[in-house]
Amino acid sequence: MLGPSKLMAFLATRDGARARAFYETTLGLRVLSDDDFALALDAGGTMLRIQKVPDFTPHPFTAAGWQVADMDDVIDRLSAAGVAVRHYPGLAQDDRGIWRAPSGARIAWFLDPDGNTLSLTAF
């Protein structure tokens, strides 16, 4: 039924201007619209709607992620922009914060300004 339909992704923010600066300037996503209710961005052809809410508690797990071709380059660029890769106790991450999944995928995590956990995956 929904197989041919385009997926939309949703996150939340307490501060729309701060979220816009992060997603547009730091991550380089194109803004589609920005109103009192949500910030809509183009994330590689998928609409990412960041809902503007008065309060919320971020999930303790990955909320959204990107498949990247060059993990090291993306981490270098995020680091240069002041974004820190997360390190998790008990997870065998390398010194850059990259974990190698049993499938062989390389995965790293970082937070947006609202504490949403975002990920990078290189297959």
Image (tube, rainbow, N blue to C red):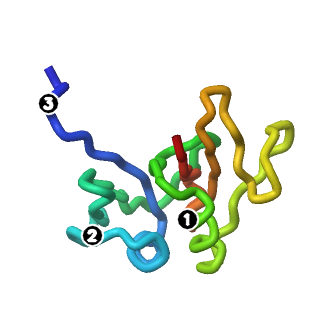
**In the figure, residue 32 lies in which quadrant?**
bottom left
**Camera-side residue: 16 or 24?**
24
Look at label 2 and name its amino acid.
Asp
Q: Name the image quarter holding the N terminus.
A: top left
Going 55% across and 50% down the picture, which residue do you hit?
119
Q: x%, y% of residue 22?
A: 48, 73
Label number found at residue 74: 1
Instruction: Pick whichever of labels 1 and 2 is earlier in the sequence.
Output: 2
**Circle 2 SS class:** loop
Q: Which residue is mark 3?
A: 4
Residue 104 falls in which quadrant of the image?
A: top right
Return the residue at label 2.
Answer: 36
Q: Disc 1, disc 2: CB below 8 Å?
A: no
96 vs 12, left or right, is right
In the image, is 117 to the left or to the right of 85? left
- CA–CA distance between discs 1 and 2? 31 Å
* Other residues around mark 1 within 10 Å, as few (<14) / some (14–19) / many (≥20): some
Name the amino acid type tagged 1: Val
Q: Amino acid at mark 3?
A: Pro
- At horizontal 52% and vertical 40% (from top left) the residue drawn is 123
Above or below, 82 relative to 122? below
Q: Residues within 10 Å of mark 3 (few under 14, many from 20)?
A: few
Residue drawn 54% across the image and 51% down it: 120
Proximity of marks 3 and 1: CB atoms separated by less than 8 Å = no
What SS does tag 1 mark?
Answer: helix
Left or right, 94 with reference to 61:
right
